[in-house]
Each structure stands twice: as structure tokens, then as C-alpha cells.
Image: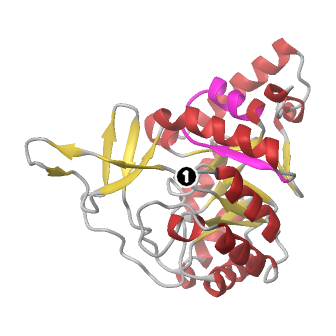
Amino acid sequence: MGKLKVAVGKLNFEFPGIVASGIMDETGDSMVRMFKSGAGAVVTKSIGSKPRPGHSNPTFTEVECGYVNAMGLPNPGIDMFEKEIKTASSEGPVIGSIFGGDEKEFAYLASRMEEFGAVAVELNLSCPHAAGYGAEIGSDPEMIVSVVSEVKSSVDIPVWAKLTPNTSSIQALGRAAEKGGADAVVAINTLKAMVICPELRKPVLSNKFGGLSGPGIKPVGVRAVYDLYSSLNIPVIGVGGITCWRDAAEYIMAGASAYQMGSAIGITGPEVFNEINEGLVSFMKEHGYETVKEMVGVAHE
């Protein structure tokens, strides 16, 4: 499947599909399984400076168009994650997802991820359900510039900024990331959402609201990628609701150099990566595309 090789800035991946942060990426062994299922790279679960339990249950519920979750960024802390990165890195490229409360914390975590062997870091500037982190920082363009520039000055590996769709202008956030020196942007994270149980007369999740992922958010993600591609000079990685090769092709044609998947792994299983790889190859042969790069952004023509 040499036709599927892609480049995101200085990084090269065998396949365009990447595991999105938050699913099947908590351990080295689970990430290795994703590589063996046809993923070109894996983004780790978002990791912070210290262990964090996250929100109390219930933290996850299924809806008709996907999932709504409010995990609250549970993680073992950066000191406990070195072994997992090293195990996964033996099989393929690992992007370390990190979250912090300020520029210094992001920079510290990025340097540790680089030390552990991550080929890039993804800044979680978009989680919608953790107070003081994620979207609360990533909704302010000036803060994005500050965080990204601080991280860039602390590491030699590429820096990706994951953007929130819960904003009036994702283009403004993308431009801020580019101004700060980001090597790529990732769009989108989950949409802020809520599910209420009529019988109990209360929200289902303990945190009351969470983030919607899955097929229902795909049109929002495609539009975000389209907008960002038209206004930035750095690569865009698309994510949100991809479950089949047609979804992946939409993102690529909107302007995504690569794409990430999360909910599809829960819906279909890890084999979804190979299924999409095979579907894309067949489509490319039928329509005369020799490389994925030839497809990137064609919807703008």
C-alpha cells in the first residue's frame, strides 16, 4: 500500500490514519495493537504532570450519532508513562498528547515526551470538560500563541495544536497556533454536549456535560478542516466522525494531510484502519490518484 504514504511536515507515515488521543492508547501494548491494525501513527492519551483520577462515573454514554463522554483527563502522570511510550515506539511513530494549566507546564511535559521517544507532541488545547485545561486555555488566541511558542522553544520535535470546535472562529485559533510556531493543527476535538435521563430528571454524566464524538460530528470537522486549509500555511490533520474510506476521503479533499480516528475503533474495532486503507487504495486506483498528497485540498479547486 505504498500509495498511502503521507507526510505531515517533516514527519512521514506509512498510512494516513492515526489513532486519536483517548482510545486504545493508554498502554504501550494497546498502541502496538493499533499499528498492527493498519494505523500510521498513534497519539497517546492526554498526559499531565501528575496522576489524575478524572471525573467520577458515569463518564460515558452512547447516543444515536456517536458517544458523549466526560472522562476528566484521567491519566497516570508523565513519570509513569515512559515505559508505555518506549514499548509503542518500538513498533511505530508515537505522538505524545499533553495537557497543562500554563505555558511552563506544557513545555515541561513536551520535553519529557521528547525524552521518552515521541516523534511529535500534540497540545490538548480543546478538551471541553476539564476545568482549567483544554478548551478553557485553547479558546483564547493569545494564550495559544504563548503556549505553542513556549513549547516550540523547549523541544526539537514537531508541535501539533489540537483545536476546539466550540468557538466562533476556528480559523482565528488556527492562525494563533501558526503564529506561535506550530508545525500542524489538528481539528477537531469533541463538541460540547449533554444527555438527560427523563426518568431520573437529571443529566446522565456526573459532570453534567461532556464531549460528543462519532459520526454526528463529521460534517462539523470537515468544515473546520476546509476553513483551516484555506487560511493556514501549515498542515491540517482532520479528526471527527470518520468510520469509512469515504469519510477519510472527505477530510483529505477538504485539506487534511492525514486523519485521526477514535470512536470508529469502538464502533467497528481496530480493523477499521485496514478496512479504510483498502478502500482508499481502491478509490485512488479508480480515479487516477497516485498518492494521497494529490488528493489533499482538491475540494478547493
Asked if the stretch drawn in magenta spans residue 238, the answer is yes
Q: Which of 291 and 132 is in front in this view?
A: 132
Residue drawn at (55%, 53%) of the image? 167
* Residue 269: x %, y % from top left: 49, 38
Q: Is residue 242 visible?
A: no
Report the span colored magenta: 234-252
Vertical side of 55 occupied by 198: above or below: above
The answer to which image quadrant residue 125 occupies is bottom right
Q: Which of 235 and 88 is in front in this view?
A: 235
Which residue is labeled 1 in the image?
Answer: 189
Residue drawn at (15%, 52%) of the image? 202
| Amino acid type, callout 1 | Asn
Q: Residue furthest front?
A: 168
Vertical side of 241 occupied by 178: above or below: below
The type of colouring in the image is: secondary structure
Q: How crowded is mark 1: few (under 14 residues within 10 Å), some or many (20 or more)?
A: many
Q: Can residue 82 be seen in this view?
A: yes
Residue drawn at (71%, 25%) of the image? 278
Residue drawn at (81%, 41%) of the image? 230
